[in-house]
Amino acid sequence: MAVKCKFSLAIIYGKKAIANPELKATYQAIAKKNQSAFNVAVLDAL
């Protein structure tokens, strides 16, 4: 249950992060090939 909660919070963070243009650009710069800014933000939150 704790893992599910942590993952849910990471998804929420990812959505908020890509809604912010500055954060989205930062995460997009970090993203590797075939990886989105959202994926990087979620991984960062985990």
Image (cartoon, grey):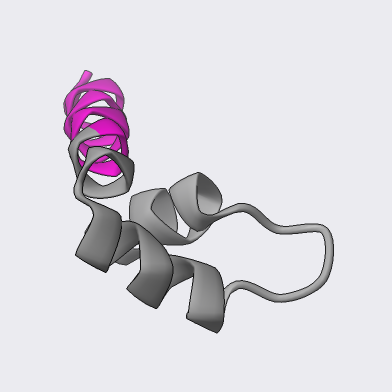
Q: In this view, does 38 lie to the left or right of 22?
A: right
Q: Which of 6 and 39 is in front in this view?
A: 39
Verify whether residue 39 appears in magenta: no
Residue that appears at 21% across and 28% down: 12
- Magenta range is 1-15
Q: Name the main secondary structure of what is drawn in magenta.
A: helix
Q: Quadrant of the C terminus?
A: bottom left
Check the image and report above or below for 9 versus 18.
above
Q: Which of 21 and 33 is in front in this view?
A: 21
Residue that appears at 53% across and 50% down: 39
Task: Give the percent coordinates (x, y) of residue 40.
Answer: 48, 61
Q: Is residue 46 visible?
A: no
Q: In this view, does 28 lie to the left or right of 42?
A: right
Task: Give the percent coordinates (x, y) of residue 42.
Answer: 38, 49
Q: Is residue 35 left or right of residue 21?
A: right
Task: Give the percent coordinates (x, y) of residue 10.
Answer: 26, 40
The residue lying furthest to the bottom in this view is 30
Residue that appears at 22% across and 18% down: 1
Check the image and report above or below for 40 versus 6.
below
**Which of the 4 image quadrants contains residue 19?**
top left
Task: Give the percent coordinates (x, y) of residue 8.
Answer: 25, 24
Residue that appears at 18% across and 24% down: 5
**Which of the 4 image quadrants contains residue 14?**
top left
The residue lying furthest to the front in this view is 21
